Amino acid sequence: MPLPKSLDSSVQPLGKATQFAEDIQEIITQAPFFDQLETAEIKLLCEFMDCYTIRRGGLLIREGDAGDFLLIILTGTVNVIKNREDGGRRIIATVGPGATVGEMAIVDNGARFASCIANEEVDFAVLDRDSLNAILHQYPQLGNKLLLMLLALMAKRLRETGIRLVPHLGEAIV
């Protein structure tokens, strides 16, 4: 898989994820998002991903860019940053090993919602839309499981956002 064009030029390839399958399994099985995957499914998923590293301060995802891939953070931490209307920026989350970022774009092909910047050297795996489609065709059980996991993750984040927004809403219209 070629390096996604929107990734920062400081990204360095590490190789196919299959080379790191045992490490990846150890990392992601501790993350709630991946808890439904069996060992064999994780190894199979690795066949469809490549791994990369980026230095501290490197840009993983730029808000507003087109995107067709998600990232699985393997080492280090990443700030998820949203541009504000006043020109400022706000950290909306900090994620670490086992977390995914960029999942909305792999599903809807929309512009990136936020930027992701490495807080330190970060290793990560990339799953792009073409690879997800290949999984769906070649391994439909795994593909469907991944899609349901993505939907559950996005629903969880939407609920959390709604809970945070409720105190800021005006009076209800009945």
Image: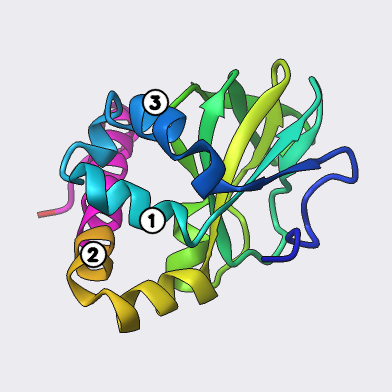
Q: Is residue 123 left or right of residue 146?
A: right
Q: Is residue 10 left or right of residue 108?
A: right
Q: For the view shown, which residue lies furthest in the front direction?
A: 19
* Residue identified by numbered label 2: 142
| CA–CA distance in space, label 3 to label 2 | 19 Å
* Residue identified by numbered label 1: 45
Instruction: Using a 10 Å C-alpha cutoff, classify the residue at mark 3 as few (fewer than 14 neighbours), some (14 to 19) or many (20 or more).
Output: some
The amino acid type, in three-letter code, at marker 1 is Leu
Between 29 and 78, which is closer to the camera in this rendering?
Answer: 29
Label located before the other in sequence (1 or 2): 1
Q: Is 30 a magenta residue?
A: no
Residue beneath the point at 46% across and 71% down: 108
User: Magenta residues, as a range?
Assistant: 148-173
Q: Tell me the quarter of the image containing the C terminus.
A: bottom left
Helix, strand or loop at disc 1?
A: helix
Helix, strand or loop at disc 2?
A: helix
Residue beneath the point at 27% across and 30% down: 29
The amino acid type, in three-letter code, at marker 2 is Leu
| CA–CA distance in space, label 1 to label 2 | 8 Å
* Residue identified by numbered label 3: 27
Q: Is residue 98 left or right of residue 79?
A: left
Quarter of the rendering containing residue 87: top right
The amino acid type, in three-letter code, at marker 3 is Ile
Residue beneath the point at 59% across and 67% down: 68
Residue 110 x/y as whole percent: 56, 69
Most prominent secondary structure in the magenta stretch?
Answer: helix
